[in-house]
Image: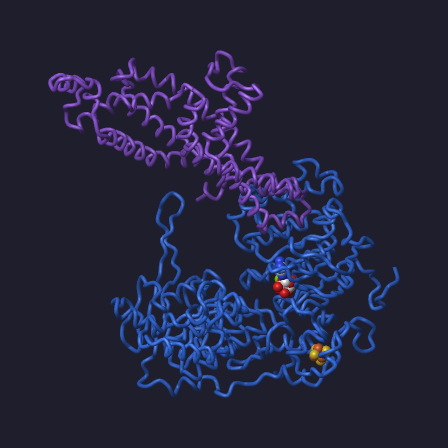
Amino acid sequence: MTATTPASLEPALLEVRGLGVDFTAPDGSPVHGVRGVDLTLRRGETVAVVGESGSGKSTTALALMRMLPGNGRIVSGSVRLDRTDLTTLGEDELRTVRGARIGMIFQDPMTSLNPVLTIGRQLDEVLRAHAREHDAGHRDRRARRRRAQELLELVGIPDPARRLDDHPHQFSGGQRQRILIAMALANEPDVLIADEPTTALDATVQEQILQLLAELNEKTGTALLLITHNLGVVARSCDRVLVMYGGTVVEDGATADVLGSPRHPYSAGLLAAVPRLSSPSGTRLYGIPGSPPDLSLPVVGCAFAARCPSADAECGTVPPPLVADGGAADVRRVACHHPGGSGVTEVPRRVPSEVPVGAARTDTVDGGAPLLEATGLRKEFGRRARGGRRDPLVAVDGVDLRLDAGETLGIVGESGSGKSTLARILVHAHPADAGVLKLRGSDVTRPSRAALRALRQEVQMVFQDPYASLNPRMTAGRIIAEPLLARGGFEDRAARRRRVGELLTQVGLDPSAADRRPRAFSGGQRQRIGIARALAPEPSVLVCDEPVAALDVSVQAQIINLLTDLQRELGLALVFIAHDLAVVRQVSHRIAVMRHGRFVETGRADDLCDSPREPYTRALLAAAPEPVRVPAAA
Amino acid sequence: MGRYLLKRIPSALVVLVIASVVVFGILRLVPGDAATALAGPDASEESVAAIRRQLGLDQALAVQYVHWIGDLLRGDLGPSYAVGGEVADLIGEGFGATVELTLGALLLTIAIGLALGVLGATSRRRSVRGVVQALTTGALAVPPFVTGVLLVLVLAVGFAVLPSGGRVGLFEAPDLELQYLLLPALCLALPSAAVVGRYLKDSLQQAFSEDYIRTATAAGVSRRRLLWRHALPNALPPVVTLIGMQTGQLLGGAVLVEAIFAWPGLGQLAETGLTARDYPVVQDLLLLLVTVFVLVQLLTDVVHAWLDPRIRWE
Ligand SMILES: Nc1ncnc2c1ncn2[C@@H]1O[C@H](COP(=O)(O)OP(=O)(O)O)[C@@H](O)[C@H]1O
Ligand code: SF4
Ligand SMILES: [Mg+2]
């Protein structure tokens, strides 16, 4: 094989050329999910694939394994593993590749293990699948069990001999992902494809899993293709990065180069949209304007043209090929007519918000009574331990907080730390078991029925999952009108419609969106609808529980900016719950760090991030991945 | 597992007690009482009253109920009023035949249901899936007495390969008995097999779309093992519950099918007993059926829990 890459002496292990995948939509029309993807992976290398959701990352990975869903098929290109073209293999030959040459792990460890089989059985199945061609020793059941035990040990499951007989539900999410990694590595594949392996996990667990993958890559020499939308993860663990947009690769190069000085306008935008832990509170986030291309339509010219600040006439007609950028052979490749073009360098600049941090607070409070004040909030959930003894789970354990009008209180903590339970107490979705909750100085801990109705309007909530929290049968207009009806004063249809239109405009949607149902909207648009619904009763407090956790970075920035704008316009008090410290720092005036139902540390956002007092806060800060070590100026 | 079973038993007992009260009560609510029926159409008031007193039917209902249950618990089913003979013997005769028919049908239900479900969910040939679809729809749409008559006409009358009705007894002539059993059992089993098959097909298709199947596929597990070792263990627990419920249906359906195939089971006894207002026969019979039904449910739950570790661990 002629080395097309003078920069590396290592020949390509996996070589994808011009890969195209079409899906058949339910109405029979084709969707071009992946278009002309080029990708090279060398032995032992770690390569990241990044890009917003729908950019074709998962489809590419599934196509490599020839595991596309029934309505998808490879329409062009080749996938060569050493010399063999996988696109032409039959089912039986493919089986000898899957697991043995290429292993794969997926996003959701909670559903990726078989719930009715023990871990030992599942590892055994994987080992015996390749016993014939791979390792004759694995034909013996006891040998397989020994190997399974070794594997669990390798991925860091304590007490592996005993745990082999446990079922998946007896393991935590992080442990399940470890087990899945063990299964993928069981037959020592040359390539491990990991499709968003940490997205469903807590920050600190994410960190551990990534560390494990890096270690295994070093120890076993398995090449890693890591799909992620987290640029921080990329910076930390990958040699090279591929940026995908609209079903194709738009930039490919060494991680430090691509993240340090992106050449494609989309890469630059994506990078600019990532909140940085080092940016002070109040920094305005950059969001890429517009929305991703519709892949059911043929793409004329550059797919990014509609959102690109450097687009010109050529971009609208001639598709830019992925070619070497600059002189340095093809170490760095970009698909753009104007790489590093004029618009790009200006875009990523962060605009400090007009209102200085903290200023909004001091002047709004009259007489010092906070808008919302809680002391000693506590909530237990009944739980029965082994032997029938009652062993209550204390979800919220003595929380004190105060919130002024126009102020944002960020709450960070891992899942299970009690954040959502606290949120539900604050919005009166369920009562506290102990403690006092005051709104404008009056006690609302145990409100009467009538008072409760009024309270629920005064304090509104925005949820994490915009998909699950909107009724799919209702139009956006109905969804937003519902709280208006409950509140009264909008019995007249025309008045209601007008108000819904106003609210939609306020959250950056067109009033005509009122007639469409949730399915017709993208994730970010749905979250806007959720926010409009929360604003409808004109609340004074907005509690947002992980409002951007399900969204892409570029969209995340738009939603966060919307929330901060609304806050300033309407003088709202915000409680902003998230696990991503960087996001929380930028939107919050003050931050509370929550753990085991308690606030372990509270303080002004910048003080807490720059000089944390508690070890736990320091651990959280250390676990937050930064995309690039940016030069001090930001 | 023993613990799990113990926890189920109290509720099963409650169901039995309630069932006994309902069975007892319903029979007394049906117009016409045993004494009048026994005495005949021309009997005088006095002789009816005498019979009533003799059978203890003049006592308060609660007292009658307590007597009945008391006797049952002692294992004394007593004589029948009208059918003739001891209730225990009457039921004993028919019960064996009905259980045999029900079990035969159950085996066929499981075998046919499994085949339909697996083929329907996994066959790569469209024609096979089509045939499975047609068979399930057909078996569900046509009531057992129609299938019964058709089967008799074709296999017993037309080709004369199987007997059209009657029973010789399993222990007397097992091979012959199986021939006698096949038609009524098949006729009884078809609708249940279709229900089970369709449910299993859906359940398997669901399992095949789950993430853990994707995991196993990516690890190189063969199609055959994906089906039998990965998808089926997940699809099966709810199907087992369904089969348990179908067993109750089969038991009820047996009574009907018995009439078509002249199968000497409990169906015939129930009919005679009911017409004659023979309280002991009908009461004991119904309670027996309920007991069997409850036991089947209990067994189903245990098997379900055994198959699904998440339930065992609760
Ligand atoms: N099963 C499918 N049927 C139809 N379209 C699909 C299917 N899976 C993915 N697509 C389309 O293919 C494109 C790429 O999706 P995907 O590979 O999942 O992106 P990513 O993993 O980057 O989020 C999207 O436009 C998506 O709508
Ligand atoms: S400059 Fe042109 S080719 Fe390059 S990304 Fe923008 S629109 Fe595409
Ligand atoms: Mg994906």
Task: Measuring from the top left, give residue A533's x and y in whole percent.
Answer: 42, 72
Q: Is A556 placed left or right of A393 in the picture?
A: right
Rendering quarter of residue B222: top right
The shade of chain A is blue
Q: Is B257 placed left or right of A5 in the picture?
A: left
Can you say which quadrant of the picture contains the N terminus of chain B? top left
Q: Nearer the viewer, residue B15 or A259?
A: B15
Task: Measuring from the top left, give residue A44's x and y in whole percent.
Answer: 75, 59
Q: Residue at x 25, y 32 (%)?
A: B26
Q: Nearer the viewer, residue A543 or B200?
A: B200
Q: Residue at x 70, y 49 (%)?
A: A99
Rendering quarter of residue B250: top left
Q: Nearer the viewer, residue B108 or A224?
A: B108
The shade of chain B is purple
Residue A210 in view (yes/no): no
Looking at the image, residue A151 lies above or below residue A342: above
Looking at the image, residue B114 lies above or below residue A263: above
Which quadrant of the figure shows ligand 3?
bottom right
Task: Measuring from the top left, give residue B217's x and y in whole percent.
Answer: 65, 48
Residue B61 in view (yes/no): yes
